[in-house]
Image (tube, rainbow, N blue to C red):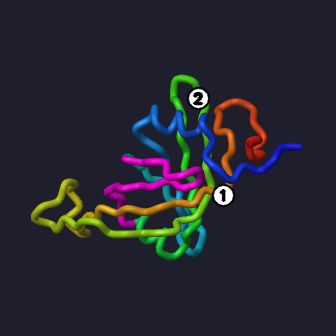
Amino acid sequence: MRVMVDMITEPVRSLMEKTTLVFVATADSSGQPHMAIGEQVTVSGDSVLIFENWFCPSTLQNIECNFRIAVVVFLPDTGKGYQMLGSVIKNTETAIHDENNQPVNTPETPQILTRFAVKIDRVLEFTSGVHSDVPIAG
């Protein structure tokens, strides 16, 4: 029987340090999913991820009403990585660009540099091959 992992192990941390992008999945209050790409992700302690990104409005709206989140980190050349499931525990706006000074062309909404922390509850293998979605052993 496999044991549930509630921490970010050294192999997960090592893979996080090797990759520049992760996939971030959120859902709104009705369960409608949304995917985003995260950059500038750091590991804090043994169970928290810290993001600081210019996330799109859908991601920010989703984490306001549904704090559950999934983060995937993987190496495309191997097709292997990890899926981390958790909850946003802190969300802070650190900067706002208005329509006159936007880094991205989205005139209908100002872009917000957001820092949020995610407490990881479970870590699963993420692979294109056969897998069971059972939390990895600690």
User: Residue 77, position in %: x, y?
Assistant: 52, 23
Among the two numbered marks 1 and 2 on one chain, the one whose residue lies closer to the N terminus: 2
Q: Residue at the spot x=74%, y=42% of the render?
A: 138
Query: Magenta stretch containing residue 52, yes or no?
Result: yes
Q: Residue furthest left?
A: 100
Q: Please tell me whether residue 123 is drawn above or below residue 66 in the rendered image.
A: above
* Foreground label between 1 and 2: 1
When asked about the image quadrant of residue 127, the answer is top right
- Numbered range of the magenta stretch: 40-57
Which residue is denoted by mark 1 in the rendering?
Answer: 121
| Label 2 Cα crowd, 10 Å radius (few <14 / some 14-19 / many 20+) | few
Q: Quadrant of the N terminus?
A: top right
Judging from the image, what secondary structure is the residue with disc 1 in?
A: strand
When asked about the image quadrant of residue 97, the answer is bottom left
Q: Residue furthest top?
A: 77
User: Residue 113, position in %: x, y?
Assistant: 29, 61
Which residue is denoted by mark 2 in the rendering?
Answer: 79
Q: Residue at the spot x=54%, y=50% of the render?
A: 71
